[in-house]
Image (cartoon, rainbow, N blue to C red):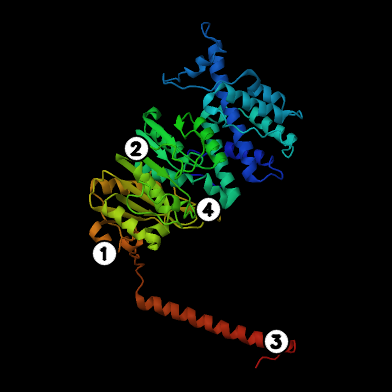
C-alpha cells in the first residue's frame, strides 16, 4: 500500500511486514473470517507486552506484589497519570504462547489464553476471539506468525503500545481493501475521520458515535488530543454498533489505545435498542451505512427523535441525522458522512426534513468530498457539520473539495495531511468562517445565508453555491491558439484519409473490395 499520509503511519515498514507475514496465514479462509485471527493476535501481543513491562517494574519493588491484579490497574505512566494495564495470567502470557508456536496445540493454547484473560478482566468479557483451534486454520502457518511477533523487537520501531496500535489500524485498512463493499461495516478511511476531527476539535466532553464500526472516530479523537498536548482523560467515549464482530473489534481497538469507552452492554440496533438513551453528547461523529433501506421505519412512526419529519422507509439517512441531533447537547456539534443524495433528494419527505433542519439554523457547513476515498463504495459522499451554538448565525459554509486529494493506488485516493495538506485546508476554512474572516473562493468555498438557500429549495449541493473556479490565462492570444489547433486538426484529417485508403486496399487483397 502507498504511504498513508493521514495517520501516524508515515514509516509503514513494520506494519507492512506484519501484514505480509500474517497474510500467509489466510490460506482458504475468507478475509472477513481471518480478520479476527490476525487482529486477535495483535491484541494478545499488546496485552502481554504491556503486562510484562509493568511486571518487570514491579519485580524491582520489594514492597510490590507482582501477582496482585490491583498493582496493574493502579499503574501510572512516566508523567504520573493513571495508565491501567490488563492483568495477564501466567498461562496466557506470550512466553507460553511462543513456546507452543510449533506444536499441534498452538490454536488451543491461544484460545485458552483468550479465555483466561477474559476471566481476569471484566471489561474484556465476551470480546476476544476464541477460534484459533478450528481445523481449517493452518497451525503451521499460525506458528510462523507467532514467531514473527516473538522475534521482532517492538522497541526498535517505537513505543510498543503505539506501534501495535498502528499495526492494528493498518491491518484494518488492509482488510477493508480485501473485503471491498462489506468493509463499510467496520472501516472509515482515516483521512475522512481525521477531517471530521480536525474541524470539530473534540478537546473535552462526551464523544459519541452511534455507528462506531471499529472505533476509528475515537482513535483519531484521542490522537488529536495528544497532538495538541491535551489529556485523553478529558473526554468520555460512547458508541454503539449492531454487528457483533465489529463491536468486538472496536472494543479491542480502543483498549489497545488505552481509551476507556462505553459501547453499550452488547451489540445492538441503534434505532431499536439505543444503548445510550439519555446521552447528550458534546461531539457526535459518525459514518452510518449509506442509504440504508428496510431499517424499520414502520415501527418507529411516533418516535420522539423525528422532530424535523418522519424519515422514509426506503432510506435511513435522515433517521441517522435526526438520531444524532436528538442526542446533541445544548452546545454540541455533529460531523457525519452522508451520501450526496441527501443534499438534494425530495423523495419520501426528505426535502422537507432537510428544509426544517436548515430553518432551525443547525447546519454549519457542508463539504463535498472527492471520489475514490473509500475501499467500499463509489457512491459520492459529503461531510455534514451541525452546531447548536453557531458563531455565524443564519449562514452556512459550503466547501467543494472534489478536486482535493491524490491517488495513492490505481483505485484509492487520499486527502493529504500536514500543514499545507488538504485536511488542514478544509479545517482552516471552517476556522476562518467561524471567526468571520473567510473570503469566498470561487470553485472552493462560499458563505451563504439561509435566504439564498431557501431560494434554492433548500438544496445543499456545494457546487451550486461556490461556482466554478476561474481558469488561469496562459497568455497565448486566441487567434494564435486557434491557428495552432486548426493546423493540428488538418494534419489529423490527412492521416485519417491515408488510413482509410490503406483499409480499402487490405480488404481488397483478401477478396472483399470496399466500394
In the rendered image, which quarter is residue 347 located in? bottom left
Q: Nearer the viewer, mark 2 or mark 3?
A: 2
Name the N-terminal-most of marks 2 and 1.
2
Name the N-terminal-most of marks 4 and 3.
4
The C terminus: image quadrant? bottom right
Name the N-terminal-most of marks 3 and 1.
1
The secondary structure type at the circle numbered 4 is loop
- Which residue is more in the foreground, 142 or 413? 142
The secondary structure type at the circle numbered 3 is helix
| Residue drawn at (60%, 48%) of the image | 178
Can residue 425 be seen by looking at this rendering?
no
What residue is disc 1 on? Answer: 455
| Residue drawn at (54%, 9%) of the image | 65
Give the left or right position of residue 122, taking residue 428 as reference.
Answer: right
* C-beta proximity under 8 Å, tags 4 and 3: no
What residue is disc 3 on? Answer: 507
Tag of residue 280: 2
Image coordinates for residue 493, horizontal then vertical, percent: 53, 83
Tell me the crowding category of disc 3: few under 14, some 14 to 19, or many 20 or more residues within 10 angstroms, Cα based.
few
Amino acid at each position: 500500500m502507498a504511504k498513508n499520509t493521514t495517520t501516524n503511519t508515515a514509516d509503514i515498514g513494520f506494519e507492512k511486514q506484519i501484514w505480509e507475514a500474517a497474510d500467509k496465514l489466510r490460506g482458504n479462509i475468507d478475509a472477513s473470517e481471518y480478520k479476527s485471527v490476525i487482529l486477535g493476535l495483535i491484541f494478545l501481543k499488546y496485552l502481554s507486552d504491556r503486562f510484562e513491562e509493568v511486571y518487570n517494574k514491579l519485580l524491582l519493588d520489594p514492597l510490590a506484589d507482582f501477582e496482585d491484579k490491583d498493582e496493574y490497574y493502579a499503574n501510572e505512566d512516566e508523567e504520573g497519570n493513571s495508565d491501567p494495564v490488563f492483568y495477564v495470567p501466567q498461562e496466557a502470557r506470550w512466553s507460553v504462547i511462543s513456546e507452543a508456536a510449533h506444536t499441534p496445540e498452538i490454536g488451543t493454547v491461544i484460545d485458552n489464553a483468550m479465555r483466561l484473560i477474559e476471566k481476569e478482566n471484566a471489561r474484556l468479557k465476551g470480546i476476544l476471539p476464541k477460534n484459533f483451534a478450528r481445523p481449517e486454520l493452518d497451525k503451521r502457518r499460525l506458528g510462523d506468525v507467532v514467531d514473527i511477533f516473538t522475534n521482532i523487537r517492538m522497541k526498535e520501531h517505537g513505543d510498543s503500545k503505539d506501534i501495535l496500535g498502528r499495526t492494528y489500524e493498518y491491518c484494518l485498512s488492509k482488510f477493508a481493501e480485501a473485503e471491498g463493499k462489506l468493509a463499510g461495516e467496520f472501516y472509515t478511511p482515516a483521512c475522512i475521520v481525521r477531517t471530521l476531527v480536525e474541524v470539530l476539535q473534540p478537546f473535552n466532553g462526551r464523544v459519541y458515535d452511534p455507528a462506531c464500526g471499529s472505533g476509528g472516530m475515537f482513535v483519531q479523537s484521542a490522537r488529536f488530543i495528544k497532538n495538541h498536548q491535551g489529556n485523553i482523560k478529558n473526554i468520555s467515549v460512547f458508541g454503539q454498533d449492531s454487528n457483533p464482530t465489529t463491536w468486538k473489534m472496536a472494543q479491542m481497538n480502543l483498549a489497545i489505545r488505552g481509551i476507556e469507552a462505553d459501547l453499550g452492554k452488547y451489540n445492538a440496533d441503534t434505532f431499536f435498542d439505543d444503548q445510550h438513551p439519555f446521552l447528550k453528547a458534546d461531539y457526535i461523529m459518525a459514518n452510518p451505512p449509506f442509504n440504508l433501506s428496510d431499517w424499520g421505519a414502520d415501527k418507529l412512526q411516533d418516535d420522539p427523535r423525528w422532530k424535523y419529519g418522519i424519515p422514509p422507509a426506503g432510506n435511513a439517512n435522515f433517521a441517522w441525522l435526526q438520531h444524532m441531533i436528538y442526542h446533541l447537547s445544548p452546545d454540541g456539534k455533529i460531523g457525519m458522512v452522508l451520501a450526496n443524495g441527501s443534499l438534494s433528494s425530495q423523495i419520501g419527505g426528505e426535502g422537507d426534513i432537510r428544509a426544517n433542519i436548515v430553518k432551525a439554523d443547525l447546519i454549519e457547513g457542508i463539504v463535498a468530498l472527492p471520489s475514490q476515498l473509500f475501499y467500499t463504495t463509489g457512491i459520492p459522499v459529503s461531510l455534514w457539520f451541525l452546531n447548536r451554538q453557531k458563531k455565524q448565525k443564519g449562514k452556512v459554509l459550503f466547501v467543494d473539495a472534489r478536486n482535493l486529494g491524490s491517488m495513492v493506488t490505481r483505485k484509492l485516493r487520499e486527502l493529504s495531511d500536514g500543514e499545507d495538506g488538504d485536511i488542514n485546508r478544509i479545517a482552516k476554512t471552517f476556522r476562518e468562517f467561524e471567526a468571520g474572516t473567510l473570503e469566498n473562493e470561487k470553485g472552493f468555498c462560499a458563505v451563504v445565508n439561509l435566504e439564498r438557500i431557501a431560494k434554492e429549495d433548500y438544496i445543499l449541493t456545494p457546487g451550486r453555491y461556490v461556482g466554478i473556479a476561474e481558469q488561469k490565462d496562459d497568455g497565448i492570444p486566441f487567434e494564435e491558439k486557434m491557428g495552432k489547433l486548426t493546423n493540428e486538426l488538418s494534419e489529423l484529417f490527412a492521416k485519417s484519409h491515408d488510413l482509410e485508403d490503406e483499409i480499402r486496399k487490405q480488404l481488397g487483397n483478401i477478396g472483399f473490395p470496399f466500394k
